[in-house]
Each structure stands twice: as structure tokens, then as C-alpha cells.
Amino acid sequence: MQYVVPKGTIFASSIEISNTYSLVGCMCQPAFEFKQFELFKQSELITQYPHLKSVIEKYALK
């Protein structure tokens, strides 16, 4: 399965069944530039998206 994630989208992945695994990759086109990469903290995301608090707490770094 492949999915195109639009520029500026925050995304994460998880598995729903315990004791299983998943292989997830991320390909960037035209190229990945670390200076454009942002890693958000929970507090920042909850401030911007309070209606998604439970999702943010599951996936985002504290």
C-alpha cells in the first residue's frame, strides 16, 4: 500500500493488533532537507489542535 502525504501534513503510524509488526518507510521527493524538518511536541500540537488531544497524546513526543 502506498499513500501520498501532502506537503505540510503531520503524520504517524501504528499497528492495531498486538504481537504483530509493520514495515513503514517514507520517501521524500524531490529530496529531503533536514533544515525543513520539524518535530513537534505534544504541548505545541495540543495548543493548535485541542480537538485531537487523544490522538496527539498517543503519537507525539512529550
Image (cartoon, helix red, strand yellow):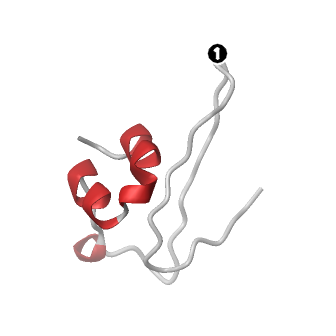
Q: What element carries label 1?
A: loop
Q: Residue at x 36, y 58 (%)?
A: 50
The location of residue 31, given as percent across then percent down, is 44, 79
User: From where the camera sits, is residue 39 visible?
Assistant: no
Looking at the image, residue 48 sits to the left or right of residue 11; the answer is left
* Kind of residue at badge 1: Asn
Residue 7 versus residue 46 in the image, above or below: below
Observer-nearest of 46 and 32: 46
As drawn, the residue found furthest toward the bottom would be 30
Q: Quick check: 34 left or right of 2?
A: left
Residue 54 place in picture, x, y as percent? 44, 43
Quadrant of the frame with the N terminus: bottom right
**Closer-to-camera residue (44/16):** 44
Quarter of the image where the C terminus is located: top left
When the figure is inspected, residue 58 is found, relative to residue 34, above or below; the finding is: above
Which residue is painted at 73% across and 62% down in the image? 2
Question: In the image, is residue 43 above or below residue 35?
Answer: above
Give the image quarter of residue 44.
bottom left
Q: Which residue is drawn at 64% across and 35% down?
A: 22
Classed neighbour count for the residue bearing mark 1: other residues with Cα under 10 Å, few (<14), some (14–19), many (≥20): few
